[in-house]
Structures are given as structure tokens and as C-alpha cells.
Amino acid sequence: MTKNHSQFFAIICVFILSISLNAQDDLPTDYLNKDFHAGRREALRKIMPDNSVMVVMAYPTRVFSNDVDYFYHQNPDMYYFSGYKEPHSILLIFKEEQKAADGSAYKEMLFVQKKDPQAEQWTGRRLGVEGAKEKLGFAAAFNGEDFKNAQIDFSKFDKIIFDRFPDDVANSGRNNADLADLIEQFKTKAGITADFAKDKRYDTRLFRDLTGTLREIKTPEEMDLLRKAIEMSWTK
């Protein structure tokens, strides 16, 4: 192996290691835990209107150059309500308890990236369905590809609450459950057309009002993190 090849191999190793350290599984010991995020979902339900559902979507990935993406930054609302840090995901929070076809009850549904060992060599480890259940506390967690056929009757809700759709979302031909697909599937399921703003059932302003209301009052966990951030800034 030549010197140049050795240097290149070392750079690749450092790159892969840095990805691993940023994976969902490698959390700092003082990270917000699943109980915090579950508490935020419960707080949201208390202020949601009756017979409503709130839909939270991940932020899109952004390409830096060719097949290299920018470091991914999750939608703060997705993280706030779920703790999930990966792209290509969608969260549904229901005001009232729902019943599945098998008779089981649920109040929320999280659709996540499917485990893919080959892709994870480059993008970092994914939680997958089992990780979302174990580490994030979601009983109703599914692969993103299951959203298309999920039996969700949006027509029965008086309010469908969601944020404005992100612009310029790339659609990968290699992934049939990327964010672009999830958005289009949601639009189809909920009957959302280009002029949906004319229908009061669809409410993007309420999404911002509800999330803003919750953010105004900081929980003890958030205050603790803020204090630590301030202390760290003083030591620099």
C-alpha cells in the first residue's frame, strides 16, 4: 500500500468513525430522554382541538455535492415530539385514542427509516422500527414504506394540523419511502389539493400556534440543558 493510499484509507476511517459517533444510538448521557418527548406529546394533546390529528414531518436532506449530503439537521418539532433524529420520517399525533383493525388502541404513529446495513455503512446506524419502540417509546412504530398502505381515515377528523410543506424536496428513485414520497402519500390520504388553504379542516397556522405555545414554557429538563449551555459558554 503506497503512502497516498494509506493516507486516503486513514481519512476514510476517520470519516466513518465520525458518522458512527453521530448516529442515533450514541447519545450523550444528558440527552433528553423518551419520557420528555412523550410528555410533550401529551401536553400537545391537551391543547389540540377535539377530533383532530397533527402531522409532523422530518426536514429534507440537502445535497452538498454530487452524492455527498450536508450534515443532517432534523426538524426541531419532529425532535421535540419524538426524539427521532433521522430523515425520511413522519409522526402522527391524535387528540383522542384510535382503534386499529385488530382492536388495539394507539394515540400516535411514527414512521421511520427502514434498517439497511449497507446504507448504514455510510449514513450511520438507523434506529429502525425496533429502536423506535425501545429507545423512543413508540408502541406504534413502522417502516416508512408502510405509510402508503396504512389504514388511516383522515376524512373523519374535523382538523388536520400540519406545517407548511418544505420546498425543493428531492425524490430518490432508489427509495420509495423518502420524504418526497411520504409527503405525497399524506396529501393523497388526506385529500390535500393545491388550494387546500380554502378548506378550514386543513390548518397550518394552528400548527405554528400550538408548537409556539408549548415552547413558551420551558420544562425543567429544558432549563437544565440551557443552564449547561450557558456554563459551557462561560468556560470558553
Image (tube, rainbow, N blue to C red):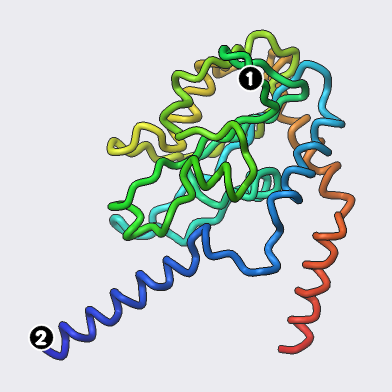
Q: Secondary structure at mark 2?
A: loop
Disc 2 + disc 1, Cβ < 8 Å: no
State which quadrant residue 192 falls in. Answer: top right
Circle 2: is it few (<14), some (14-19), or many (20+) Cα within 10 Å?
few
Report the residue marked by disc 1.
104
The C terminus sits in image quarter? bottom right
Q: Position of residue 9 (x, y in %)?
A: 23, 79
Choose mark 2 or mark 1, whichever is in front: 1
Q: Amino acid at mark 1?
A: Ser
Name the outermost residue toward the top. Answer: 156
Please tell me which residue is depicted at 77% across the width and 24% down the height of the picture.
95
According to the picture, the residue beneath numbered tag 2 turns out to be 1
- Specify the farthest residue to the right: 217
**x then y, percent, for residue 232:** 74, 81
Q: Mark 2 to mark 1: distance in Å? A: 59 Å
Answer with left or right where residue 34 lies relative to residue 109.
right
**Residue under the point 42% across and 56% down:** 125
Disc assigned to residue 6: none
Q: Position of residue 174 (x, y in %)?
A: 28, 38
Considering depth in this image, is 184 or 95 the residue closer to the camera?
95
Q: Nearer the viewer, residue 209 or 141?
A: 141
Task: Using the image, determine if residue 211 lies above or below residue 13.
Answer: above
Q: Is residue 16 above or below residue 100?
A: below
